[in-house]
Amino acid sequence: MLELLFHEASHVWDSVLIKDVTDAAKRLNVRAPRDLWHGLLFFNSGTIVTQVLAAAGERDYQMYMEKERMFDRVYRGMREPMRAHWTAFLDGKISRAEATERILRDLNLPAIK
C-alpha cells in the first residue's frame, strides 16, 4: 500500500518523465514505448520503497511491478534496462536524462524512417 500511495503521489512528476522520454527518443531517432514514462514512475516508487524497507530490516518486500508481473504484461523487456540504468540514476551515478537514454538504447528499438 505504501508503494502505491507513493506512486500515485509521484504523478506530479509525469510531465518531467514524459519530456525526458520524448527528448531521449528524439535524440536516438526511435519511437519510445507509449507508457515507458509510467513504468519508470512505478519502478522509481518500487525501488525507493524497497530500499527504505530494507534499511529498516524488511528484506522480503517485493515491489508492485514484480508482484503483479507487470514486466511480463505491460513493460516487457524493460526489467533489466530499468534495473541497470534507473537504479544508477537513483544512486546518483548518472543523470536522469542519461538513464532514460540508456534504457531506450537497451530496448533495441527500430529507428524511425
Image (spheres, grey):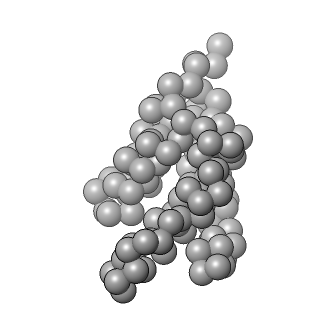
| Residue furthest bottom in the image | 56
- Residue drawn at the location 68% of the way across and 43% of the way down: 73
Decide which of 80, 40 is in the foreground and name it.
Answer: 80
User: On the rendered structure, is 18 left or right of 87?
Assistant: right
Decide which of 55, 31 is in the foreground and name it.
Answer: 55
Establish if 80 lies above or below 110: below
| Residue furthest front in the image | 60
Quadrant of residue 48 within the rendered picture:
bottom left
User: On the rendered structure, is 46 left or right of 73?
Assistant: left
Residue 48 visible (yes or no): no
Across and down, in percent, residue 101 comes to: 46, 40
Residue 105 visible (yes or no): yes
Establish if 3 lies above or below 28: below
Across and down, in percent, residue 100 comes to: 48, 46
Across and down, in percent, residue 35 comes to: 69, 46
Looking at the figure, which quarter contains the C terminus?
Answer: top right
User: On the rendered structure, is 84 left or right of 74?
Assistant: left
Establish if 76 lies above or below 69: above
Decide which of 98, 70 is in the foreground and name it.
Answer: 70
